[in-house]
Amino acid sequence: MAAELIDGKAFAAELRERVAGHVAGLRAAHGIVPGLAVVLVGEDPASEVYVRNKGRQTVEVGMASFEHKLAAETSEAALLDLVARLNGDDAVHGILVQLPLPAHIDADAVINAIDPAKDVDGFTLSNVGLLGTGQKAMVPCTPLGCLMMLKDRLGDLSGLDAVVIGRSNIVGKPMAQLLLGQSCTVTIAHSRTRDLPEVVRRADIVVAAVGRPEMVPGDWIKPGAVVIDVGINRIPAPERGEGKTRLVGDCHFESCAAVAGAITPVPGGVGPMTIACLLANTVTACCRAHGLPEPEGLTA
Ligand code: GUN
């Protein structure tokens, strides 16, 4: 393997330490405890795991965690009512409504009901618009984590060619905005892109966020490029025994690592950074809510 491994787990642990330091400082100097409310509707097993991890890590860094688990049949009106109460609750500085929501609920309506100042996911129209116009926004957690790792590895990104594969609202689009904000030349590729291999071969930075297991092979990667693999896909692993599975990214790890300059592994790359960035955003939101200076080291 030629590529340096970008250790997201270690990076996330460092970020959580910085968060914990700021939390301790807020408590000692001002008696303020940042609070994060997470709302889960229904019983999607993957979402339940995420929400449990979020709650545990929130408490570990010294913040207050408010978990709201609602039945799958919860009405949109009841969910909007909960969001309104959290908006008005001074102990809550960050609100996250776990997606996907059940089909009978209009997810856009719920997300946009969140007070933008408490929107630690950065999904409200207000924060999307602020990010797109280069203003101070709450930045979505996964792209924020990717940018932190890219800047740590590359320093100044100005003038670099970046290709983002995937155009989701949660990752692809905000990732492209962040890279543009760093003066990269940005291409967003997707399922209709013509000659994707050639597009990817031009890139100094590849961010893969499509959700297709091992879709990007090593011969698409420019030698020395930095590869950030956002995909987390579970695939059958009969070699580990009957019915066993394993996690893989959107990039074929071995072949990409043989060519890239640096690459994030799956698991242990982007994944751990997402929750750490959520905690960081909550502390940032808390400081803004109290008119305190922006904490250092929590944004890219
Ligand atoms: N579901 C998967 N990823 C996310 C995320 O980053 N935020 C929310 N709210 N839901 C998700």
Image (cartoon, rainbow, N blue to C red):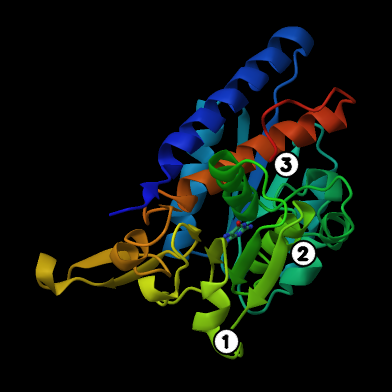
User: Between marks 2 and 1, how big is the CA–CA gap?
Assistant: 28 Å
Q: Residue at x 51, y 73 (%)?
A: 201
Residue at which label 2 appears:
110
The residue carrying pointer 2 sits among few (fewer than 14), some (14 to 19) or many (20 or more) residues within 10 Å by Cα, namely some
Is residue 273 shown left or right of residue 254? right
Residue at which label 3 appears:
94
* Image position, residue 9 (x, y; %): 42, 40
Question: Hey, which quadrant is residue 177 in on the image?
Answer: bottom right
Figure quadrant of the N terminus: bottom left
Question: Hey, which quadrant is residue 99 in on the image?
Answer: bottom right
> Foreground: 212 or 108?
212
Q: Residue at x 59, y 54 (%)?
A: 142
User: Could you tell me if residue 286 is visible in this image?
Assistant: yes
Residue at which label 1 appears:
191
> Foreground: 123 or 135?
135
Figure quadrant of the C terminus: top right
Ligand 1 quarter of the rendering:
bottom right
Residue type at tag 1 = Ser
